[in-house]
Amino acid sequence: MKSSSDIKQILDYLRELQVNNDRSWFKSHKERYDALRQAWERDMERLITLVGQWDDNVRGLMVRDCVYRIYRDTRFSANKAPYKNYFSGVLGRGGRHTIMASYYVHFEPDHCLLCGGIWWPEKDILNRLRALIDAEPQEFLHIAQQPDIAQRYHWECQTLKKMPQGYPVDHPLAQFIKMKEYLLMMPVDEQYFDCDDWVERVASDLRPLKPMHDFLNYVFD
């Protein structure tokens, strides 16, 4: 089944929006935006269904709870551009409001991504994640070193300069203990979506992240 949305058309629209990021231009192209957005959301709904076949935390999610609005909150930002220049969504328990490990897809000109993990956990959760990795280093490394993760994804995380209190400076997993978040990222180019069904391809490429999500989500049990 071929996807109903054409990612090239979406990215072309977003490129135009990048250089015309104002309400007048957006309003004059609103019909085009609505058509692209609706088709994309139908495919995101299909992606939820596919991922939900092998991840219970995604099964049954509503697409409206997973995708982000294009409208920016500019109240506390120096950048007053009213619109985001990307489409994106989170697949995990609670949708875009989740605090658990989840999947993230990001469609932006020259910056398309498939991601997984936990974004900016609160201090208590971060402490529990570090303690979990410290307690189960072999299980963590076994998952992280699986070829479908290690050869395709990379860790994209802000880290401490020094080890957090309570951990030795020569800890064998210091790289991971110092992380402030646990994000795995796979950049993809536009040709990645040039296939009969990019939705199935995305679902397949997100699937290797599930064991890591199951591991990280131990802290919520």
Image: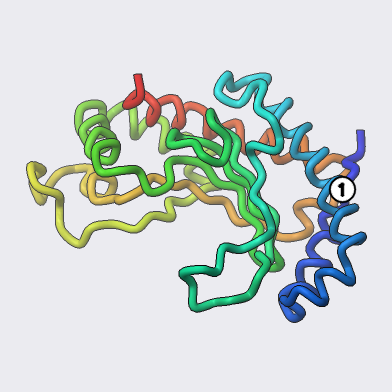
* The one of 175 and 87 positioned closer to us in this rendering: 87
Q: Residues within 10 Å of mark 1 (few under 14, many from 20)?
A: many
Q: Residue at x 64, y 64 (%)?
A: 111
Residue type, numbered disc 1: Ser
Against 116, is 159 above or below? Answer: below
At 64% from the left and 49% from the top, the residue drawn is 68
Give the farthest residue toward the bottom. Answer: 19
- Taking the image as shown, residue 221 lies to the left or right of residue 109, namely left
Q: Residue at the location (64% across, 45% down)?
A: 89
Q: Position of residue 187 (x, y in %)?
A: 60, 56
Whether residue 82 is situated above or below residue 199 in the rendered picture:
below
Rendered image coloring scheme: rainbow
Element type where label 1 sits in the image = loop
Q: Label 1: which residue?
A: 5
> 108 or 33: nearer the eye?
33
Q: Nearer the viewer, residue 179 or 85?
A: 85
Picture quadrant where residue 51 is located: top right
What residue appears at the point 76 percent right and 60 percent down from the top-left corner? 190
Residue 101 place in picture, x, y as percent: 46, 35
Say whether residue 2 is left or right of residue 182.
right
User: Would you place residue 138 above or below residue 165 in this image?
Assistant: above
